[in-house]
Image (cartoon, grey):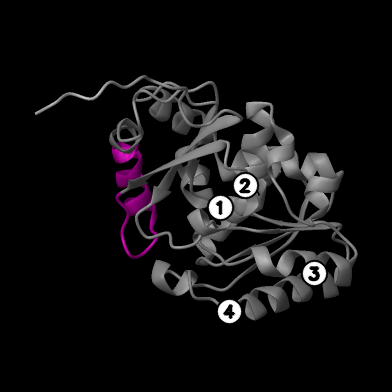
Amino acid sequence: MTRAPYRLTDPLGRTATLGLIVLQSDETIEHDFRRLIPDPDVALYVSRVPSGDTLTPQMIAAMADNLPSAATLLPRAARFDAVAYACTSGTTLIGADKVAALVQSACTTRRVCNPLSAAHAAVAHVGASRLGILSPYTSGIADALADAFRDAGIGVVRTLSFGEAEEANVARIDPASIAEGARMIARQGDVDAIFLSCTNLRTLDIIEGLEAELDMPVFGSNLSLAWHMARMAGVDSIVKGPYRLLRR
């Protein structure tokens, strides 16, 4: 064997290096992130955390135990600008501070993000004070989500839920049904922004139309998280799309 010479070059991610810890059952967020962040100079690495087919408080508690292990599976040599635990309801029940501690115990990153904190930041960014929330899950989880917004000082006027517990079904809820749920929230009045919760919901293709139709900001978990991660990494402009959250 003849040994060929070689040299080392810079790592991927000249603009930013991001990590996502995604639920095993999530079929949507990776696809959305690659649409929202098309820059080839942004390195996006994904790990999976074990999760059950049905979202329950017991499953989320077990997922918290597995978060450090999932974080260790991200590339060790990568220098992460931000790593996110990509579960809105999971963050609601585990707690954002505990999520950050669990992730940082197992990987090196400048920032730890999550969809719940990202949505809180999005509400402030668009200047909303009367929020409507659409959730795919059962009332116990949907109510806990609304309480988490209120605990952050955000006025939640109305919540609506599909009452679905099976993650495979959440990933297949027709975007037209999601859009109609947003319209139901808006028709009752008194809201000035709508949050479409859950990283597994297919929200990206309906947001622009809803914002034009309802004349208010509309944002989902994935859009909020991508936007917030970019801000935390100091590279706001990498997230692309015709959304009010990105224009303000």
Discs 3/1, front:
1
Q: Mark 3 to mark 1: distance in Å? A: 22 Å
Which amino acid lies under the numbered mark 1 shown in the image of this protein? Arg
Residue 188 versus residue 168: which sits nearer the camera?
168
Q: Amino acid at mark 2?
A: Ile
Q: Which residues are magenta?
A: 50-67
- The disc labelled 3 sits on which kind of residue? Leu
Tell which circle, 3 or 1, labels the residue nearer the N-terminal end: 1
Q: How far from the left and from the top, in percent, is residue 70?
A: 32, 38
Residue found 71% across the figure and 74% down from its top: 179
Which residue in the protein does label 4 denote? 174
Q: Which mark is residue 209?
A: none
Residue with the mark numbered 1: 34
Front of the two marks 1 and 4: 1
Which residue has dot 2 on it? 37
* Labels 2 and 3: the sequence-earlier one: 2
Residues tagged 2 and 1 counted as in contact (Cβ below 8 A): yes
Which image quadrant: the C terminus? top right
> Which residue is under mark 3?
210
